[in-house]
Amino acid sequence: MSNEIVPVDDPIEEPKPNKKPVVYDEDEGSKGVVNSLTYYGESSSSGSGGYVPEVFNSESLPSTLASEIQRFLRVANMLEWKAARVAYLCRFHAFEIAHNLDRNSTGRKVRQFKTMLLQRLERDEETSKTKRKEQSDSRELKRVYDENRRYISQHAEAFDLENSHGEKLLDACRIASVLYDVLKAVIAGPQALADRESIQARTELFAYNILPLDHGGIQQAIMKFPEIKVAIQVIRNVRGLPSTQNLPKRGTFIDCFEFLQYSFGFQKENVANQREHLVLLLANVLSQHSRKQALALKTIDASIDELMRKFFKNYTNWCKFLVRKSNIRLPCVKQDAQQYKILYIGLYLLIWGEAANLRFMPECLCYIFHHMAYELHGMLTGAVSMTTGDTVEPAYGGSHESFLSNVVTPIYEVIRKEAEKNKCGTADHTTWRNYDDLNEFFWSPDCFQIGWPMRLEHDFFCTSSPKKSKVKTSRSAREQRKEKEAEDEEQGLNDVTSEENREPKWLGKTNFVEIRSFWQVFRSFDRMWSFFILSLQAMIIMACHDVGSPLEVFDAVILEDVMSIFITSAILKLIQAILDITFTWKARNTMELSQKRIQLLRLAYAVIWTIVLPVVYAQSRRKYTCYSTQNESWIGEWCYSPFMVVVVVYLITNAVDLVLFFVPAVSKYIEISNWSICRTISRWTQPRLYVGRGMQETQISLFKYTFFWMLVLSTKLVFSYSFEIKPLIAPTREIMKIGVQTYDWHELFPKVRSNVGAIVAVWAPIIVVYFMDTQIWYSVYCTVCGGLYGILHHLGEIRTLGMLRSRFHSLPSAFNRLIPPPSKKRTKSLLQNIFCKVSKSEVLDQKFVLVWNQIISNFRSEDLISNREMDLMTIPTSGLFPEFIRWPIFLLANKFSTALSIARDFVGKDEKLFKRIRKDEYMYFSVKECYESVKYILEVLIVGDLEKRVVSNIVNEIERSIEESTFLQDFKMSALPALQNKFVELLELIVEGDKNQNGKVVQVLQDIFELVTNDMMANGHRVVDLIECSQEAVDDFTFFSRKREPQLFESAASKTSICFPLPDDGPLTEQIQRLHLLLTVKDKAMDMPANLEARRRISFFATSLFMDMPSAPEVCSMMSFSVMTPHYMEDVNFSMKELQSSKGQVSIIFYMQKIFPDEWKNFLERMGYQNFNELIDDEKEEEIRKWASFRGQTLSRTVRGIMYYRQALKLQALLEMPEYKDVVQDVNVFERNNPKSSAELDALVDMKFTYVVSCQMFGSHKSSGDPRAEDVKDLMIRYPALRVAYIEEKEEIIADKPQKVYSSILAKAVGTFDQVIYRIKLPGPPIIGEGKPENQNHAIIFTRGEALQTIDMNQDNYLEEALKVRNLLQEFHHNRGRRPPTILGLREHIFTGSVSSLAWFMSYQETSFVTIGQRLLANPLRVRFHYGHPDVFDRLFHMTRGGISKASKTINLSEDVFAGFNSTLRRGCITYHEYLQVGKGRDVGLNQISKFEAKVANGNSEQTLSRDIHRLGRRFDFFRMLSCYFTTIGFYFSSLISVLGIYVFLYGQLYLVLSGLEKALLIEARMKNIESLETALASQSFIQLGLLTGLPMVMEIGLEKGFLTALKDFVLMQLQLAAVFFTFSLGTKTHHFGRTIMYGGAKYIPTGRKVVVFHASFTENYRLYSRSHFVKGFELLLLLVVYDLFRRSYQSSMAYVLITYSVWFMTMTWLFAPFFFNPSGFDWDKIVDDWKGWNKWIKEKGGIGIQQNKSWQSWWNDEQAHLRRSGYGARLFEILLSIRFFLYQYGLVYHLDISQQSKNFLVYVLSWVVILAVFLTVKAVNIGRQLFSARYHLMFRFFKAFLFLSVFTIVITLSVICELSSKDLLVCCLAFLPTGWGLILVAQAVRPIIENTGLWQFTEVLAKAYDYGMGSILFSPIAILAWLPIISAFQTRFLFNQAFNRHLQIQPILEGKKKQK
């Protein structure tokens, strides 16, 4: 039967509307342009002119309409030129659909769109009719429809996108599908349905991701792989499945996924996505076996079992933990079991794929799967419910979107509502439940009380107070639930209790409460702090007993005193028990009763020991029972007291822990076992949680990190005892003996004896340093161990071009051992990698040659090298001279010329000359290749018989001489240089190939002949005689000829002597060019490549070939993997407008031309232009955009880099093909000539590699016409394998009201359009927590494979590194300790450190962390986590355990590291590998760097509060816990302690100086000649070992660049003020870390990542650093000045300098570093502008909508945000901290001359009277300004003059009467200024109380005055220095020294001059 539509003439009516739609009065449409399409409202020229076809914008559409009408508008644009009327009808149909969807135009931009489309329809209605070829619209539609349908029928079977018909077929399918819908609307009645289905099927042929699983895709290459066929066959096994009788499906099921879809109500798109997902997973697991094995039934079962184990490992552990029986039940029949397994895996994938934000809650998914698996098993087996008597059916049925609506949405709503309570990160963590709280509810058996169907009135769903959360459920739902509960109780699924009438309550936190307190540091790492505190106490006791040897500790008296530390231990345990109860109080509702009891028991246990130990110690002290040993030994007599016995009893529990520590296997078994005794033991030590159990490492790993920390701790303790504690014991005793009776102030505690204040002031800084310096010793040992590890693993083995040239001969063999798959006969070992001898026969294997040339070609395409450099570095591929090696010319540079010089000057025998040349392998091969090349070229060039004989004789003569060792006798070497020049001239003529130069060629050949025969050959006459003989023979025949006979090499009419120009032969041309280079290249070529980045990359690639890495499998057998990149609003490409705009500075394109001058030159050479203007004139803007974007931190750079994976895999797959030997010339040529093989390669790579970019805003960018959407689309078109996932926010009109619907969408490029592949509806907006992890989460369902690499959009990748990805993935198959790795860590190269000094410092700092730091973390410390985004995840492990990051707002600010925490807590293993690197960009300006440091510090402070850090700290063994602390939050906490140490030291000195204690003690010490006391008081308490933390950086530079270079760089960095930069960064870290822990407010800080470094205004610097650096700097400055002022009478200046030099350095750094590192910071013009901007900013009033960069008032209010959201405790803490500023006033007023040495407390009271008077004076001036300044200006001036004279009179009077001195005025300033600042801080803390009073207004005025004063003080020295021009030049030099070294033009950039090349 024909499927054609039969045209009917009469009944068909024209598709004219009965009435015209309403025309709305709107402005013109959107101005967004997409693919050169017109705007909505763009119109062609009207009037009498003809019809001008033009397209209508089909891309920027309203979100409510886009998915329904876009395809009609796109087809209309396609048909505009060939079928205008059909295009009109398509648009008309689109308008009708739009109008029906939203009749009232309530959706966003709908009214505007409909108006524009209607205008277009009105304009085209009549003009399009004239273009109609048929009589009616229906016939016209039918004609075009038939044309496309016939084309589809003819070409669909042979479909291939690479085919020339591919694009046409694609367009035909689109058109036919759309026209069917239009025809259906035009023609009444459903006709041609079968034809529609056929067209639709073919249209869907293109709407696939990787696998075209419909029947039309069977012809595609990927569907022909046997593994794919087997996988499809497995999932399509529907034998035995229940019938569709009770389901909405009609007919049989296609596969298992369709059965699950209709049974449980999953979305169709989700089913399609996960179907492809499972097919690819199963096929890839099968492919890891051999092809024969993969098709065997046993292998298929084993592969499915492997997937089952990976998918359900977490689920089975969860069931075991909750003591529940797993609902994965398999039948005994093997075939049925396989089907069941596929159904279970498919069910989990469908749950996971539709779970949205629930994917962050893995145990919640286990709960859902648990119940649905039970239902699935019941359906499969036909089980009957014992309660209802009916067969088991899904609780929620299989209706459309049932699973989303009934299961996902209720739980999602709980997550969303809890997240809203977070208030954008400002609410306290205790007030809302995050993802972890909600997920951990499912760690308790109580979760089964939720039931199935879920009881929505359960407490879990309550998100507010009981009154607001009462849930009403329908009667039918309640009855259904009761029946289900009864059934589930029989099966053990539910633990539901009858609580129908109970009002739900909020459950609160689960298991852990994130409370803001520094006590969290102690609580999480209590064992470490206890160890340090007890060690300190023990060392002080030992020092007091003058212990000099460890054996002396065993003396009974000393031992008893030392054992008193256990009293302290008991107290610390009591504190810990109290903290545990306090900090978990708000989680009591979800805490198990047994855990509550254990906490109380532990508290009671601690209280008992806290009482018993001190009492026994006090009563039994010095009461010993002694025993003498019979044999003489070192023990002698040993004594013990009752206290010692009690201590031994106290330590019994610790002894058990010690035993378990040394036997980790037993400890692991106890933790994971379900035996009641094991549970009891584990519960006593730690709460029994689902995670954090069984994390123990192997015995070897345990030994390694234990040994490391024993070294660190022993060094630290010995140093602390010898240099910190013991030297202070004697001075302390002396201080206690000296009695100070008089003080310089009013002593508040005069009865305190022994000078306790002085002792505290001396000891406090030492104790602070004691708790901090472990971090320094860790850095030292990290340097040593990391350096040794790097040396042993060949890091930096090839670090220079010289090393590369010397080792190049060994690269091919190293490459062949690692990169290509190993042969069956070949085995690999580490020793072979290091010491193998390279055989000459395999040195230049063709695989290596091809890969090397691809790398070099890629360098050229990236413009890293020039054309000449590419020629010099490429290895020839032609097979001209297979008998010897032809090295790349950059290795042979100048070798031939050197050999020529040696031969020319050589005197001796031939053997010595040959031996000397052969000694240098490269020289020998260059001479040999030149000789053979000359022979070959002359053989082709010379065609005359005589000439051939002549050349042959010369060659024979040369070879005979060489063979007989008479070469030096037969040939004169002095003419060799002249001969070389002649050959160069000849080659240049040949290369030029100009026919007119034939005579010159002949002449050069003749010159060469004469030179050889006359000047070189001793027997040259033989060759001349041959010519003469030939001439005489010719003369006999031409005796009577009058023509002149041609000379040698000349051509005549009858004969041709030379073939010139030479034939166009590729290998010949290549060899001629190569010979020319060999003869002409000089020493410069030895420095190839000249580009530093190219050198670094090629050196690292060469080095990595000698590292220990697994051998690579074949591409078809490798692990499959995906890469995912999250993208938000960052740059995709630079636009031309952005590149050329300057905004008062230089343009980006100008900047890049100066920063990358060599790459710009190479780019111009590649494009064939001379300068920028020529490119613009020739419309090459797109190429310019690409070039600039590839050098910024853009998405296009990242995508290009990641797509090198695909290029590398395709190249490697090609080399593994049997016919790869045909590819020796060019890969691209091979692909063009073999389209079938190329398609197979593409299919294989598609099967193994997927790249998804999660462009969160792509949908909104498209609808708004944002250019970034077009840039993303261009990326998809450029890289067809790229997939883009984005969030669609669509408005649906329901009851005339728009409602937002969210979907996760995956799109790809088809032709020039983006096509939606999958659209999976979401329960709501997916971004409800931290944006980045949730952006990743929505897209992760579209990734494929067994591994997943996460790459940020500021990263890059390289082709040569992508070649090693197969080796890397093999690491997942190698156990690292007890288990295979779950995260593979990779090293990063910071590519932004090439210009400014700051970028250089930052890149070195970052490089040392991502190399030597992580190297040590992974091995031996075993605590590496996830620190960013080059890491590769075990995808299946993490997708079943919560994903690749955490997303709770604020607490998971550093979302990446939590993936590592989660992986470790769930018994994962994280490794680190240095043989593969990726590029990474960092910020390059100080302000951007500081924002980044602040963001990281904020993240670490939130980590401090997190449950993950707490559990790691409590559940690791002691030494692994130390590793965890000092490599995570410990670094920041130690930095905070180090800064606090400075304050403690200075305030201690201030106390000693102002109280007079130091003066009295020093005078006493000098009188009694007690040097130790004077030394102790004058020593620098803050030990400056901070530079030691830079040792890892120096070591890493030394390893990779050489230790001489490292030393040079280190010195150079110090000269460029690196110490200033790192000290300033220390202030940034400590400020944000400390403030966030106390007050919160952590949030993501965007840094911009701009490529240009420009001047920052003074105002901007002040806003950024005022509170973090400037205020603290001024405080330190005041402390130093006061200390200096009052110590002069008894202390030398040298002592003062030695004590305080480091503090002065820090003070000046914190005050002035932002201006030192500010480009053009000392430029006078910019200084003037900054001053004007500063004054404007200070005076501008704030208010609503005024940004903080516009007004001081707005900024000041924002700076107090952390206090406004803080509780009373934090405010009280702020007030207590502010009290320190009043110490200045208290101490200084007693040193005023006016006080006349009075020590009465009244002096201090009077000082407050003075302060009050000053405040009243200021207030009077302010009131006077308000009353008189406007109208009575003269009166206001008189008023100010009166106040001034009054104050002046009072000062004069006091100076005369009360002896007020000028020094008193200075001291008053030093006393009262800190007091004023302290009052401001107190006022800010109590703002809610005084905000509505006049006090707050006065506080604001006072604060503005302080800020203005501080700013003016900072600005003054900068302005003075700006007068000196040398300062600006010096600053430019140290800021951009790296650029100067590279001869870059920095000054034009700084001056902002735009120069065009």
Image (cartoon, helix red, strand yellow):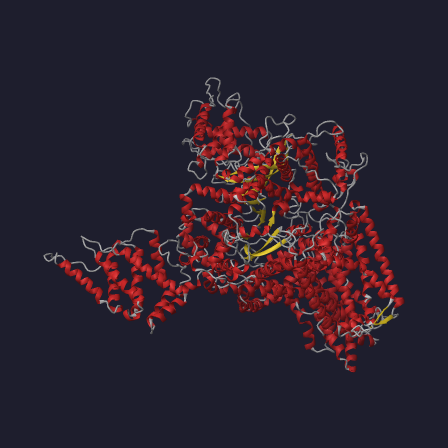
Where residue 833 sits: x, y (%)?
Answer: 52, 59
753 and 902: which one is in front?
902
Closer to the camera, 154 or 1638?
154
The number of discs equals 0
Q: Residue furthest top?
A: 10
Is 1013 situated left or right of 735 in this image? Answer: left
Which image quarter holds the C terminus? bottom left
Instruction: Give the residue furthest to the right.
Output: 619
Q: Is residue 1827 visible?
A: no
From what the image shows, is residue 202 above or below residue 665?
A: above
Instruction: From the top left corner, tell me how far across and down residue 1716 is, in percent.
Output: 59, 64
Vertically, is 530 above or below 1573? above
Image-based side of 502 in relation to 1523, left or right: right
Compared with 2, 1706 (above or below) is: below
Most extreme residue toward the left is 1040
Q: Position of residue 718 (x, y in %)?
A: 71, 70
Tell me the quarter of the picture where residue 1524 sits.
bottom right
The reply to whether residue 1922 is visible in this rendering is yes
* In the image: residue 144, left or right of residue 387: left
196 and 1236: which is toward the camera: 1236
Coordinates of residue 1386 in the picture (x, y in percent): 58, 55
